[in-house]
Image: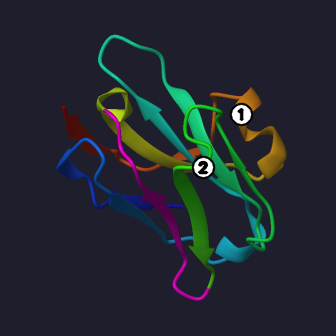
Amino acid sequence: VQLQASGGGLVQAGQSLSLSCVSSQFTFSAWPMGWFRQAPGKERQFVASISDSGGSSYYADSVKGRFTISRDNVKKTVYLHMTRLKPEDTAVYYCATDPRYSASNYHLYDRYDYWGQGTQVTVSS
């Protein structure tokens, strides 16, 4: 399984940005997907996850109400639409997947079988 994340960039606080993560996985629609981020000098943290069907999604408190995770199982792509960005959202964003965990538990784990390469998001004040 290969995950290719893209869409990062430099934006001003208050603006929006959307990330994409394309999977090579044949059974993409059978696995939950998640987004994580790591800021300089900090540990990687959970951002959002979505169930295999896309019917359920979960968010870290810090992004709830501002970020939206979605997926297109035909395109084998998971998205993270970020609005009202803040400087503290600056980080490298990673997509990840692992069939061992349900989407509702993605926030509990930091070891995943498959990671994307990361895409940098920088929010200026």
Whether 28 is among the magenta residues is no
Residue type at tag 2: Gly
Question: For mark 1, what is the residue?
Answer: 107
How far across and down, in percent of the image, does residue 99 sit?
A: 77, 53
Dividing the image into 4 quarters, which one contains the N terminus?
bottom right
In percent of width and height, residue 93 lies at 39, 42
- State left or right for residue 19 relative to residue 29: left
Q: Is residue 55 left or right of residue 9?
A: right
- Identify the residue at horizontal 44%, vertical 44% (top origin): 94
C-alpha separation, residue under disc 1 versus residue under disc 2: 17 Å
Q: Kindly tell me whether residue 57 is visible in this rendering.
A: yes
Q: Is residue 112 above or below residue 26?
A: above
Residue 117 x %, y %: 35, 47
Q: Disc 2 designates what residue?
A: 65
Q: Is residue 78 left or right of residue 13?
A: right
Secondary structure, mark 2, is: loop
Residue at horizontal 33 percent and vertical 57 percent from the top: 16
Quarter of the view holding residue 7: bottom left
Q: Are marks 1 and 2 in contact (CB under 8 Å)?
A: no
Of all residues shown, which one is farthest toward the bottom? 74
Whether 108 is drawn above or below 96: the answer is above
Range shown magenta: 74-86
Towards the viewer: 21 or 48: 48
Placement of the C terminus among the 4 image quadrants:
top left
